[in-house]
Amino acid sequence: MSESSGSTGRLYGVGLGPGDPNLMTLRAVQAIGDADVVAYHSARHGRSIARSIAAAHLRPDHIEEALVYPVTTETTDHPGGYRGALEEFYEKAAARLAAHLDAGRTVAVLAEGDPMFYGSYMHMHKRLADRYATEVIPGVTSVSAAAARLGTPLVEGEEILTILPGTLPEEELTARLAATDTAVVMKLGRTFPAVRGAFEASGRLPEARYVERATMPGERTGELADIDPESVPYFSVAVLPSRIDAPRPSGQAAGEVVVVGTGPAGPLWLTPETRGALAAADDLVGYTTYLDRVPVRPGQARHGSDNKVESERAEFALDLARRGHRVAVVSGGDPGVFAMATAVLEVASQDDYADIPVRVQPGVTAANAAAARAGAPLGHDYATISLSDRLKPWEVIAGRLRAAASADLVLALYNPGSKSRTWQVGQARDLLLEHRSPDTPVVLARDVGGPTESVRTVRLADVDPAEVDMRTLLIVGSSQTRWVQRGGDGGRGIVWTPRRYPEA
């Protein structure tokens, strides 16, 4: 509520609820009764849904101000286009209300739902509330009404609710629907075909419900997939209800395995698609350290294990899927880069699991994360090599290092050392010094995105194996890689490799 001195009138933004007059609050009814002027928005046909909801509370002595939109679609010959036409309308409408307020009259602006929730009232509020005493009276939103009419929980426990306008581009809607637990998409009507396409592309269509004119005459509910696009009005919403304890929708895939990459650290590195796969899974399977990055969800089983049992973990996940479970195998970084995707696909290639659907979803790999922190050292051709000799002989690693070094490739070195492997970094450094200048920049990136993140750059000759462990990634520059000191880099400098290679 804002206050203003003097003899000017008072402004009310009155939330009327979703449509049923019985859902108006007592305070809304009181504010209308106190008003000298009742204002409401309407389309050019002159009918106002807001007025119809509040009709029983209007008096003959009320001054009515019908604020009629000049356009209802983006087709207009206004020199400022659709946005310009609306801005001009809002200015004129606010001026009309200000004239009443200056005359000492109390003005109630009626708003369907809640005045501050996708409502027209807010445009009056922004232009008037700093000049006149103002009170906003909340109302039941269409979101709450839709959930109530569906009779199913909308959001529960730690679930995340996302509210989206259907006017967003279809790809943006798809990404957000894939990433969230529950959602409501508003402003349907002519946007419905794109909204339905986004639900389908995100894999959420079997869960989606439809509510039209909730609590109003002509109310309709149903499965979103069954709705005729030609029959959808503006006052309708699409709903993804809570997944907790919800039955699996008909048409949704039965058992499957999705291998997901969680990036180098926590939730900030997850893609929308990965978030969606993690939320949809019945079971999470993975190395315990990576599972700890995923929020606990009611009804979802978690199966953690040691980091050295990849094949057993893959077989366990596929067995769960064979019994009808939706399984997410959780991997760090990108699952296809020295991680779980290969282990799962190797087991899935056996005849026993040939019919189990397996999908791989990418994640931000450590090399990309480290490179971004340092600058752009991977700006030209580069090679990715693991220094771990647990699954391949050191002779193979050394041969690949020599070949990549002689080809003048930038190198991203994974798994450089551990408590039981302390000598590989030193040998790799000495081998590379046979082909590279001692001044070649080397990025040492540890725990990128994590609480102990450390990213610094040293000369190749100065690489100290004692400073490298399994959580460290090394990026070794080529002959063209530059290490530049700039004032805006906090003294660390930036490392980048030119995209253009010099002629021989």
Image (cartoon, rainbow, N blue to C red):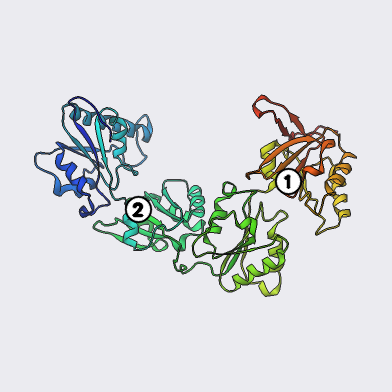
Query: Which marked residue is nearer to the observer: mark 1 or mark 2?
Result: 1
- The amino acid type, in three-letter code, at marker 2 is Val
Does the CB distance between marks 1 and 2 fall below 8 Å?
no
| Residue 93 sits in quarter | top left
Task: Please tell me which residue lies in front, 472 or 501.
Answer: 472
Extreme residue in the left direction: 60
SS class, disc 1: strand
81 to the left or right of 173: left
Quarter that holds the C terminus: top right
226 to the left or right of 488: left
Residue 440 horizontal/vertical position (percent)? 82, 34
Say if residue 51 shows up in the picture.
no
Task: Please tell me which residue lies in front, 296 or 358.
Answer: 296
| Residue 497 sits in quarter | top right
Task: Give me the residue at 74% from left, 50% from top.
Answer: 470
40 to the left or right of 118: left
Badge number at residue 143 = 2
Q: How many marks?
A: 2
Dot 2 alpha-carbon crowd within 10 angstroms: few under 14, some 14 to 19, many 20 or more = many
Residue 112 horizontal/vertical position (percent)? 27, 47
Task: Please tell me which residue lies in front, 294 or 246.
Answer: 294
Mark 1 or mark 2, which has the lower sequence index? 2
Rendered view: 366 above or below 12:
below
Extreme residue in the right direction: 434
Dot 1 alpha-carbon crowd within 10 angstroms: few under 14, some 14 to 19, many 20 or more = many
36 to the left or right of 18: left
Residue on which the image places disc 1: 472
Distance of mark 1 from mark 2, alpha carbons? Answer: 47 Å
Task: Please tell me which residue lies in front, 457 or 333.
Answer: 457
Task: Give me the residue at 18% from left, 46% from top.
Answer: 29
- The amino acid type, in three-letter code, at marker 1 is Thr
SS class, disc 2: helix
